[in-house]
């Protein structure tokens, strides 16, 4: 996802002057959005897994 977004910004930037500060700000905002989404997804997955999940039948025998 990050690679595609970076390439898209690169091709758009070909038509205008390059502003390094603007590019860094856009990359940073995209990375922050990606990490935030990944953390929310992980959080929701873990909450559902711990609330709904059940131990395997042989779990206590193995321990």
Image: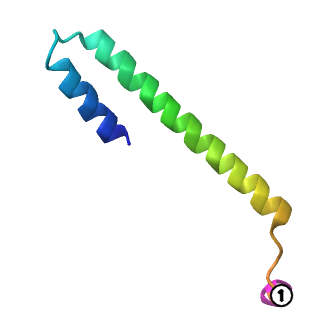
38 or 7: nearer the eye?
7
Residue at image point 63% right, 47% down: 41
Residue at image point 38% right, 16% down: 25
8 to the left or right of 14: right
Say above or below: 27 vs 47: above
Q: Position of residue 53 (x, y in %)?
A: 80, 69
Say above or below: 53 vs 20: below
Quarter residue 57 falls in? bottom right
Which residue in the protein does label 1 denote?
A: 57
The magenta segment is 59-63
Is 33 in the magenta?
Answer: no
10 to the left or right of 25: left
Picture quarter with the C terminus: bottom right
Picture quarter with the N terminus: top left
Residue at image point 33% right, 18% down: 24
Q: Main secondary structure of the magenta part?
A: helix
Residue at image point 23% right, 9% down: 19
63 or 32: nearer the eye?
32
How many numbered callouts? 1
How crowded is the residue under tag 1: few (<14 C-alpha within 10 Å), some, or many (20+)?
Answer: few
29 to the left or right of 39: left
Q: Secondary structure at mark 1?
A: loop
Q: Colour scheme used in the picture?
A: rainbow
Say above or below: 44 vs 49: above
Q: Position of residue 58 (x, y in %)?
A: 81, 89
């Amino acid at each position: 996802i990050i690679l595609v977004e970076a390439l898209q910004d690169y091709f758009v930037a070909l038509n205008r002057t390059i502003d390094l500060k603007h590019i860094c700000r856009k990359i940073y905002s995209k990375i922050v959005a990606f990490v935030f989404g990944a953390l929310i997804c992980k959080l929701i997955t873990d909450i559902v897994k711990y609330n709904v999940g059940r131990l395997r039948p042989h779990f206590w025998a193995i321990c």
